[in-house]
Image (tube, rainbow, N blue to C red):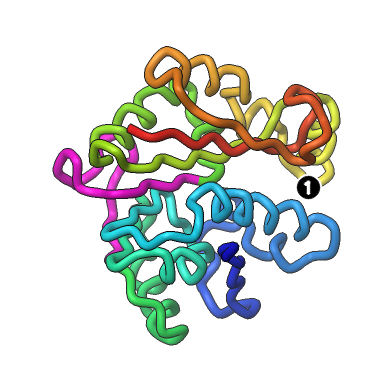
Amino acid sequence: MRNRLQLPRRNALPPVDPDAEPTRYYYWPLVGWFYRKRLQMALDALEARPYPRLLEVACGSGLFLPSLRPLCEELHALDRHEHLESVRQGLARLGVAAELRQGDALAMPYAAESFDAVVNVSMLEHLPEPGDAIAEMLRVLKPGGRLVLGFPCRNPGMDAFFRLLGFDPRAIHPSSHQDILATLRQRRPGFTLAVLPRWLPLDFSLYCVCTMTK
């Protein structure tokens, strides 16, 4: 059975940082399709199986957590922002149980080999050196665990898309998809890659999701 995205109703969760995570875009026509599709791709990569402990890194407003909750016995989430209590309250109103912690993705407050699955959507492109975050996610992942990473592709079409939304793509995304993939190949060469749309070559695609087993 396919995991289905369970998008909370609009304004059910607090917009913690409109610039870093513009939650309103998920509910717009056309643009919303792209934002929602990224999350659905990550759900597809996780597959429909229960994980004892699952972690979302850079959870933002918690928008993805209602969809992740049915896939695990324990759901954990990490972000560095200071509004996690508001996120926790919003999730409680939705009936979503999750253990939220404040911390840096480059030095996560978890012991090594703590999680059976780790998922991260649209964070690595914001880092000048994504390899440090990848290494940290692999550190907290158990042997045999699944790591799912999503990030946009860099090309003229996607640059124009982000400019239409009011962002300078090079300023907000110092790392391209090729930078991230090169880092992944150095650290963990065996991975699978899904692209959006499926029929386009990687460098002309909108988004990609990388899946690997530790």
In the displayed structure, 55 sits above or below 200; it is below
In the shown orientation, is residue 106 left or right of residue 165?
A: left
What amino acid type is highlighted by mark number 1? Leu
Stretch in magenta: 99-120
Image spot of residue 43 (x, y percent): 55, 55
Task: Please give the name of the residue rendered at 39% of the width and 21% of the height, measured from the top-left corner.
Answer: 188
Q: Which residue is mark 1?
A: 165
Residue placed most toward the observer, 42 or 12: 42
Nearer-the-camera pick, 108 or 193: 193
Residue drawn 34% across the image and 76% down it: 97
Residue 140 % position (x, y): 24, 40
The image quadrant of residue 134 is top left
19, 98: nearer the viewer: 98
Question: So how many labels did they put on this image?
Answer: 1
Q: Is residue 100 magenta?
A: yes
Name the quadrant of the N terminus: bottom right
Where residue 99 sits: x, y (%)? 27, 66
